[in-house]
Image (cartoon, rainbow, N blue to C red):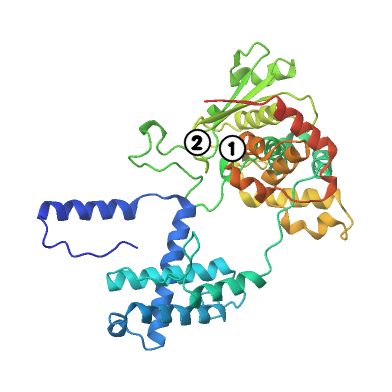
């Protein structure tokens, strides 16, 4: 929400500049995640306004509220939201969601009243501020007894083996190479080394009419990068021989078949980390599945044969007699869950029972868990996977033991030969 302030007593030139500033702020491309967060915030504030009207708290009454009365209004609102009077009509909202309803309502009241409304506990002696007990207790009670969602499961070596057997055993392996399953297989086996997020190679939450997500055309973005794909393009993958001489993509497939491609360098132009244009190098492992160079060569070869332009994402696949498509989060989920079914035909198997926890983000879980089991510290994991140190514990957990010693050895061994450049 943008604060409303009367600027009529200021020079007209400044009023015009202020309007331009607000307009730029409101129209700036903040990305799909932040855009959705903004919409969620606004919709909760609008819900609060309607809720107040239902209780007779019209604008006439709201404008007369004291800070203490605002506190009671927010407390009643939180209580009702917990009991199911919310946009979703759910009684099982998580504590953080309930808190977000309260934050939206609080900011709405501050906006219409034109002042700061204090809802903190001024008698709390801790180092961190706390909400007034009338609010904090309601939220903490929900947090204490809330049942969290199940954690994401990592990919296992059996899943990759089953998927490879299926791809190799098809009646037409060539057509399989272009298909969705081979595309996801390549990106997932590369992703266990890189800890890819889906947005770094695939597409999710596309806006209407979008084929793939793009870097915004904002003044903050260098001109040559504006409107480029967010997902990786061909120039983000570079290959080198044993002497570190770069190998052009036009020669890549033939030279790889002759055993001359030994190194892969991947460039992350923009991701959720605080560092842009990070580069990581990976050495060939020689493993038939878990080799980052082999997976990347396959990705570039598919992109080349499908005729993907240089400045479009390279996460692509195609069906027979159809133009290429960009791999999506739902594609990854579908393929990796199917690989789970192929690897573990017994529906009572642990992985089948937790099938719904196999998602694109499982790549990051797999990478983190394998590195940890290989003896890497949290600092090492954060550095190698381009994460913030505090994010590492999120991905480390006890998991199904058959993640596979083969997969663990391949990843930890390759990571020992990985280094960064800028």
- x%, y% of residue 138? 55, 76
Query: Pointer 1: what residue?
Result: 386
Rendered position, 182 above or below 341: above
Q: Is residue 401 visible?
A: yes
Mark 2 and 1 residues: CB-CB less than 8 Å, in contact? yes
Indicate the quadrant containing the N terminus: top left, top right, bottom left or bottom right.
bottom left
What is the secondary structure assignment of the residue under circle 2?
loop
Question: Which of 276 and 169 lies nearest the eye of the viewer?
Answer: 276
Residue 165, how many percent across, how many down? 84, 39
Image location of residue 356, percent across then percent down: 73, 58
Q: CA distance from mark 2 to mark 1?
A: 8 Å
Residue 275 is tagged as 2
Please give the count of numbered marks on the rendered protein.
2
Q: Residue at x 57, y 42 (%)?
A: 388
Q: Which mark is residue 105?
A: none
Label 1 element class = loop
Of residues 85 and 136, the one drawn nearer to the viewer in this rendering: 136
Comes first in the chain, label 2 or label 1: 2
């Amino acid at each position: 929400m943008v604060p409303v302030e009367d600027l009529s007593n200021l020079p007209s030139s400044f009023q015009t500049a202020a309007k331009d500033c607000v307009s730029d702020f409101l129209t700036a491309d903040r990305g799909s995640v932040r855009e959705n967060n903004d919409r969620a915030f606004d919709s909760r504030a609008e819900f609060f306004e309607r809720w107040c009207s239902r209780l007779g708290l019209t604008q006439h009454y709201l404008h007369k509220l004291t800070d203490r009365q605002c506190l009671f209004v927010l407390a009643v609102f939180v209580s009702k939201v917990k009991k199911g009077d919310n946009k979703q009509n759910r009684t099982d909202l998580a504590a953080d969601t309930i808190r977000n309803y309260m934050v939206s309502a609080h900011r709405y009241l501050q906006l219409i009243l034109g002042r700061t409304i204090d809802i903190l506990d001024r008698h709390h002696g801790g180092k961190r501020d706390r909400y007034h007990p009338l609010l904090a207790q309601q939220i903490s009670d929900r947090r204490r007894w809330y049942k969290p969602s199940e954690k994401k499961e990592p990919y296992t070596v059996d899943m990759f083996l089953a998927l490879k057997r299926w791809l190799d055993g098809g009646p037409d392996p060539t057509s399989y190479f272009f298909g969705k399953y081979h595309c996801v297989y390549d990106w997932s086996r590369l992703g266990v080394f890189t800890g890819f997020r889906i947005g770094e190679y695939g597409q999710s939450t596309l806006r209407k009419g979008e084929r793939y997500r793009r870097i915004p055309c904002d003044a903050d973005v260098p001109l040559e990068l504006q409107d480029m794909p967010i997902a990786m393009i061909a120039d983000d993958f570079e290959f080198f021989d044993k002497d570190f001489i770069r190998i052009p993509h036009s020669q890549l497939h033939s030279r790889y078949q002759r055993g001359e491609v030994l190194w892969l360098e991947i460039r992350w132009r923009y991701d959720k980390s605080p560092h842009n244009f990070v580069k990581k190098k990976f050495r060939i492992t020689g493993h038939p599945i878990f080799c980052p160079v082999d997976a990347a060569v396959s990705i570039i070869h598919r992109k080349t044969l499908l005729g993907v332009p240089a400045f479009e994402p390279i996460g692509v696949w195609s069906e027979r007699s159809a133009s290429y498509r960009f791999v999506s989060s739902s594609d990854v989920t579908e393929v990796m869950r199917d690989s789970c079914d192929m690897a573990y035909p017994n529906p009572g198997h642990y992985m089948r029972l937790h099938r719904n926890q196999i998602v694109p983000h499982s790549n990051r879980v797999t990478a983190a868990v394998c590195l940890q089991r290989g003896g890497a510290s949290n600092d090492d994991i954060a550095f190698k996977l381009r994460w913030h140190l505090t994010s590492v514990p999120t991905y480390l957990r006890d998991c199904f033991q058959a993640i596979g010693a083969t997969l663990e050895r391949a990843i930890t061994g390759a990571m020992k030969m990985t280094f960064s450049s800028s």
